Amino acid sequence: MSPSAVPVVRRRRRRASFAHAAARGRSHDARAMKNKKKRQERARADEDALAELRARPASALGDVASDSEDETVNDAHAKRRRASVVPGTGYVPEGKAKSVDASLVNKNEKTLVLTSRGATSRYRHLMLDLLTLVPNAKKDAKLDTKNERNVVVEAADLRGCSSAMFFECRKKQDCYMWLAKTPSGPSIKFHVENVHTMAELKMTGNHLKFSRPSLHFAPAFDETAHRRLIKEALIQTFATPYRHFKSKPFYDHQMCFYWEDNRVWFRNYQVVHPAGKEVKTQGLTLSETGPRLCLHPIKIFAGAFGGAVLFEDETFVSPNAQRAESKKRDVTKYQQKVQKKQARKAHKHMNQLRGGELDDLFRDGDD
C-alpha cells in the first residue's frame, strides 16, 4: 500500500466505526423504548388491579396485606388458586398456575435494619438472618449508644425507608427490638428472648433467599387493640411488596407469628411440595428453617421512638431487676451459711463433754 492511500483507508475505517456506533445506538434506543412500553403496560395493569380491589367492599378483600392463604370464599385470588390447584393436595402443576393481580402492600415499602454498638455475635447473626428473609430491607451502619434513637428516623429518611427495625443492645447481654413506622410512628419496643439463629439450629428446611413469604398470624392477635397494632407492625415490616425487584415470584416459605404468655413467638417454615407419585396422595408439608425468637412487647408509643404511651405491659420485669434480685438471693444464702456456722460453734461450746473418773484409766505410763 502506497503512503498516499493510508489516509484514505483510515477515513474509511473511521466512517465504518461511526456507522457501527450509530447502528448500535439506534438498537439501544429501540430496546429502551420497548422496555419503557412494557413498564408502562405493567403500571397500567397494576393501577387497574388496585382500582378493582379498592372498588370491592372491605369484607371481600380478605387478608391481602399479609399475603396469607386466608382469603374469603368470594375473593378472586382464592378462586384463581382453586382453579389451578390439584384437588386434595394443594399442589400447583407447572404451567397451570394463574398469576395474582396485586396486593395492597405498597411497592415502595422499605425497611431499615440496623443495630447499636456493643451487640453480641448472637444478636448480630439474628439481624443477618432477618435480612435474608426480608428482600426490601436495607442495612445501615451501627449506631453509637451515645446518640439518641431519633437518629434512626433521619437515617431511614436518607435511605428512603418507611419502616425501621432497630436492635438496641445493652451491657452486651440484653437486646431490645424497635419496630417503628417512620417518620410519624407508631413504634413498638420489644425485649428479645430465646434467640436461636439458623447456623445454630441446623434445621432441614432450606427455602430460596428473598422468596415472598406467606404470613400466618394466630387468631389471638385480633382479640385486643394493642395486639392488632402489633400484627399490623409485623405485616408492614416482614411482608414483601408485590413485584419487588429482589423477590422471587412464588411462595416457598411461611413466617408464623404466635401469641402465648403475652409474647410473640416467631417461626419460619419451608413449604415442601410433593414430588413424583406423592403428588396425588400427599399434600404440602412444612419443614422448619429458622431462626427462632420470642418478642416480649414492653411499650407502644404514638410517635417514632417516642411520644405518648399507648400501651405498657405492667408484668414486664427488666433484666437488670432480675439480676439484682438473683444477687440478693445469693447474698441471703451466704448470710444463712455464716449464721449456721456460728450457731454450730456456739452449740459445740455450750455442749462440751465433761471429764469423768475413768478418763485416765488406760493412759500409758500409769501404774
Image (spheres, rainbow, N blue to C red):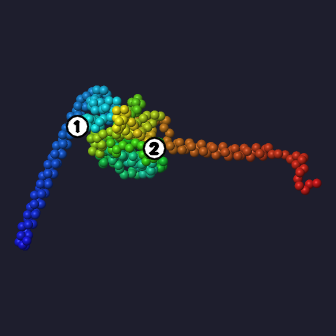
Query: Is the N terminus in the top left, top right, bottom left or bottom right quadrant?
Result: bottom left
Residue at x 21%, y 34% (from the top left corner): 48
Give coordinates of residue 8: x percent, y percent.
6, 67
Residue 326, numbered label: none
Q: Residue furthest front?
A: 277
**73 or 237, which is in the foreground?**
73
Q: Name the side, left or right, on which 178 lies relative to 321.
A: left
Give coordinates of residue 187: x percent, y percent.
38, 40
First in sequence: mark 2 vs mark 1: 1
Query: Is the C terminus in the top left, top right, bottom left or bottom right quadrant?
Result: bottom right
- Residue 35, visible in the rendered structure: yes
Q: Which residue lies furthest to the left in this view?
A: 4
Q: Where 221 sits versus 292, above or below?
A: above
Q: Where 128 sits versus 219, above or below?
A: below
Q: Name the side, left or right, on which 161 lies relative to 4.
A: right
Question: Label 1, on which residue?
Answer: 46
| Kind of residue at badge 1 | Asp
Give coordinates of residue 327: x percent, y percent.
57, 45
Question: Label 2, on which residue?
Answer: 195
Quarter of the figure with residue 40: top left
Residue at x 39%, y 36% (from the top left corner): 285
Q: Name the side, left or right, on which 75 lies relative to 270.
A: left
Residue at x 27%, y 41% (from the top left corner): 243
**59 or 163, which is in the foreground?**
59
Quarter of the figure with residue 244: top left
- Neighbour class for label 2 at 10 Å: few (<14), some, many (≥20)? some
| Kind of residue at badge 2 | Val
Give coordinates of residue 128: x percent, y percent.
39, 48
Count of marks overlaid on the render: 2
- Neighbour class for label 1 at 10 Å: few (<14), some, many (≥20)? some
Q: Is mark 2 on a helix, strand or loop?
A: strand
